[in-house]
Image: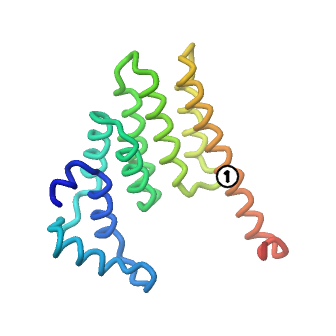
Amino acid sequence: MQDDMKCYPIAEVIVQLVHLKTIKKPQYKLHALKLLLNQYYGYPKERADRDEFLKDLVQKYLSNPTKLANFAIRLYCKYTEADWLKEKINDVLKPMVYQVPVGENHFKANVIYLSANVCQHLHLGSRDKYMSELRTWFCSLSAGNPPKAIKQSVQYALNMLQKKQAKSEIRAKRRNDASLRDR
């Protein structure tokens, strides 16, 4: 089973998420999963450094871009703190778009899709400054005359941010208006 962690990044992510989460609510049952992974499969008992772990996931994705590696990155980012995720978007995911070799437009488009999906997990307000920074960055990716695949991925990313903004505005209205809270 130790070889599965090398072949399947999702196994590594599950192990690290079990170590990351300390929720003691009955419905999660993470302690039992942690014991199972440690005793029967020999998975690591310690937490990996979050920064290095994400960089390793990204490098694996860049060397072998699969749907499973894409999902592993998205899953890991979904359950992390927003401040750390903002920092990693700037330090790891944004540079990852520029690491894609020239001429591999579909791969670059997939990396932009991945970045948009990770940004979806941020809990930003409708007037958050970081939201406008992300929108500006995605728009800069379509500057000039990019190929159709990149234009479509940038449009997808901008639509995701717009939906995120609309949802946060609805939540804010519900918090402020007592008649809308029950819906």
Give the answer, above or below, for where 13 lies relative to 23: above
Nearest the eye: 129 or 21: 21
User: Looking at this rendering, what residue extends furthest in the right direction?
Assistant: 179
Nearest the eye: 118 or 82: 118
Nearest the eye: 150 or 1: 1
User: Looking at this rendering, what residue extends furthest in the top direction?
Assistant: 145
**13 horizontally vs 163: left or right:** left
Q: Residue at x 39, y 27 (%)?
A: 98
Q: Position of residue 181 (x, y in %)?
A: 77, 74
Q: Position of residue 26 (x, y in %)?
A: 43, 86
Kind of element beneath mark 1: loop
Q: Quadrant of the N terminus?
A: bottom left
Q: Residue at x 52, y 42 (%)?
A: 116
Q: Position of residue 139 (x, y in %)?
A: 59, 29
Q: Which residue is mark 1?
A: 126
Residue type at mark 1: give it.
Answer: Ser
Give the answer, above or below, for where 4 lies relative to 102: below
